[in-house]
Amino acid sequence: MDYLKGLNEAQYQAVTTLEGPLMVLAGAGSGKTRVLTMRIAHLITNLVDPFNILALTFTNKAAKEMKERIGKVVGQSEAKSLWMGTFHSVFARILRSEAHLLGFPSNFTIYDSQDSLNVIRKVLKDNNIDADLYKPKKVQSRISNYKNNLITVKAYFGNPELIENDERANMKHMGLIYQKYVEACFKNGAMDFDDLLLRTNELLTRFPEVLAKYQDRFRYILVDEYQDTNHSQYLIVKALASKFENICVVGDDAQSIYSFRGANIYNILNFKKDYPDAVTVSLEQNYRSTQNIVNAANVVISKNVQQFKKNVFSENEEGDKIKVYRALSDADEASFVASNIWEKHNSEQRKFTDFAILYRTNSQTRAFEDALRRKNIPYKVYGGLSFYQRKEVKDLIAYLRILINENDNEALSRIINYPTRGIGETTQNKLVVFADSQNVSVSSVLDNLGIYAPQLGLNNGILTKLSDFWSMIKAFQVMLKTENAYNVAMEVAKRSGLIKFLKDDQTPEGISRVENIQELMNSMQGFIEEQQQIEDGDPSLANFLENIALSADTQTDKDEQGDQVSLMTIHLSKGLEFPVVHLVGLEENLFPSFMSSSTREELEEERRLFYVALTRAEKQAYFTYAVSRFQWGKITNAEPSRFLSEMDAQHLEFINPVAETRFINRSGLKSNIFDDEPAEPRSFKKKEEKKSIQRSEALPASQKLKPVATARITNPSGASSENIEVGDQVRHDRFGVGEVLFLDGTDPDNIKAKVKFQHEGEKNLILKFAKLTKI
DNA sequence: CGAATCGGTCTTTTT
DNA sequence: GACCGATTCG
């Protein structure tokens, strides 16, 4: 049992406590992955059949890596029958084999957020609901909220409180939209991301024999990143583990950063309540970072109210101070970072892979790409608009999806007239309306075009076009029976006219679109080869589609061999480590995000995000911020992030002196930034509220308490802040002088002002961005 | 029916 | 500045 050597006491306990509920609180850099892999290896060495182990991870990549490491200890063949993956991919697999019970086809399509957004838009249109009042994105997030809290359509209509709540939010049609959306997905034979969890819950609740089957199968359950599980995931784990209670959860409440998609930090905070006999192990020694980095991070995270007491410490060298650079603009910031990397690459012989640039939003990438390219520094951008979400790629995929699931109307409407083949909107509408009136699917109308033709009211020319199109699809389907996925996709790309259509466009964008199609073909080829190499591999088209739907990171591990600087959002960086980290864009309204500064909860999450970012660094960390930034097509001023002023000066070193004066001024000025909030008494109440809510019902976004704000604005120049009131004379950069007619809204980030300008007439402005000056 | 153009809106993070 | 939708013209 060599693998047990070199574990510290806490790690040893976590690895060897095999039976019963166990919670491992793993501070940043405390060897969490090592503990998880060794624990699983230890289970197998102790003769637990790998077949009986279920390990749920946060990304598919993490699962893959861990599986490999376990294989090295217990042998690859043993590791193979382990079930390891994300909640979504593991339960998608289970749902496929049990789909018939729920009335779904086993080849159901998985909708990504773009697909589901399209379905929502269609629902709004079909029901004549104004998309301006019901922003599709907002509708989507509300529906997601329902689903993650197990509020089905039926449950929704049975709960007056929810209905009332939506009415208060001026969204009284939410129930109808929700219902229609669910119906549409069902008709299309499709599940969205949330469905994968919701339907699993449905499966386990409605069919006790199914639950029993999987309870017996998964005798040992491990959940990584437990702090980021949502209510739906929580219930699945609870149900599966309830028979044997061999449940081990690993996580760090200080690193919970996914509440925007329903993650409920109380899952981990209340673990002891769910399992009173649970053993708790705390891993507190950080092996990753220098003392200076660990201590600096501790100072910031200690500002959060909600957390377990922990004492994360490092016995590594003390290390350098964190260097702070104040840039004049986003371009200046990027060029500083690029120069710094270049210099360290030369003077300290560091590889480019040693460096990471971490940012809050994807839109910040561009400036860094430019700067790095100018210096010929190789880099790789992770995440962002995933490759598979590009339009041309999605179009080809839509063709492939239709081959697997003909009822996928979302895919059908994407390609029925793309490339254009004379089947316009009018025709498509007639098809859909007719299919609905006959209570059959669009695909079956197309299947029986001959029979339905007289009733469709379409002329012969159109009918021929339709039947040509559909026989092409049918031919692809036939081909799929004998040929492999790659050959079929190639044929689809050619015969559909897609390639030719794209090749006609010789602009740089057009050429890159063709390249993207080629890249998709390559990745498909790679996938098939990979699947053929592993035993029980599944190189089918259906499996390929499932894989790309559930793993945004498929292309990330591809060219990992290269020596490249890594660029990614902080969210994506969780679980990774780099010798040198540049944390950039440390500005108010960017980080913390302007979307997340209105409640204490939101701010605490941003602070955890900051904590995650800093603790990625092993040796050195750089903070940068810019005083002005090109954003939304214009230049905006910015002030340093409050997180900078929350740090302890002893951990910092200011590179350019101006930064120091600015910083000190500001921290003196703004140390009371929290005192502005109508703070603490309410936080206590809130905690109580949340506890009682989480077990039973949802916490729809609108129900969150908003601070009772006065119409206070912060002038982005940082010079002054002032109150603007109705009746004030104000000046606007572009519109000139005007009078404030009225103010609307309580959320300080979202106060709208109606202003009557002398020359430009009445305008509705968001106070925060309008930069009005009182005169 | 389809291409082109204009205008308005929105941009936090992701399985 | 990117993307969607509506509108207009051929």
Image (cartoon, coloured by chain):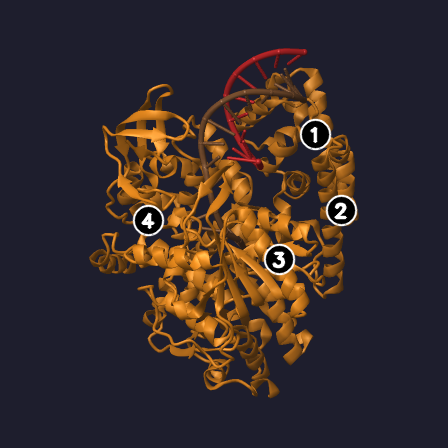
Chain colours: A orange, B brown, C red
The residues tagged by marks 1 and 4 sit, at their Cα atoms, a distance apart of 46 Å
The N terminus of chain A is located in which quarter? bottom right
Chain letter, disc 3 residue: A
Q: Amino acid at mark 2?
A: Lys
Q: Secondary structure at mark 1?
A: loop
Mark 3 element type = helix
Label 2 vs 3, first from the N-terminus: 3
**Would residue A350 be seen by someone viewing this image from the given angle?**
no
For the residue labelled by badge 4, is the local secondary structure a helix, a strand or a loop? loop
For label 3, the crowd category at 10 Å Cα-Cα, with few meaning under 14, some 14 to 19 and many 20 or more, is some
Q: Chain of mark 2?
A: A
> Taking A630 as reference, is A619 above or below it?
below
Mark 1 vs mark 2, foreground winner is 1
Mark 1: amino acid: Pro
Q: Nearer the viewer, residue A138 or A451?
A: A138
Q: From the viewer's perspective, is residue A607 above or below residue A398?
A: below
Is label 4 in contact with label 3 (beta carbons under 8 Å)?
no
- Residue A339 image label: 3
Can you tell which of label 2 and label 4 is closer to the viewer?
A: 4
- What is the number of the mark on residue A598? 4
Tell me the number on the disc at residue A419.
1
Chain letter of disc 4 in the image: A
Tell me whether circle 3 and circle 1 mark residues in contact (CB < 8 Å): no
* Residue at mark 2: A481
Residue at coordinates 37% horizontally, 30% vertically from top-left? A732
Q: CA distance from mark 2 to mark 3?
A: 55 Å
Kind of residue at badge 4: Ser
**Residue A361 percent coordinates (x, y):** 50, 50
Sequence-wise first label, 2 or 4: 2
Do marks 2 and 3 share a subunit? yes
Q: Secondary structure at mark 2?
A: helix
Q: Earlier in the sequence, mark 1 or mark 2?
A: 1
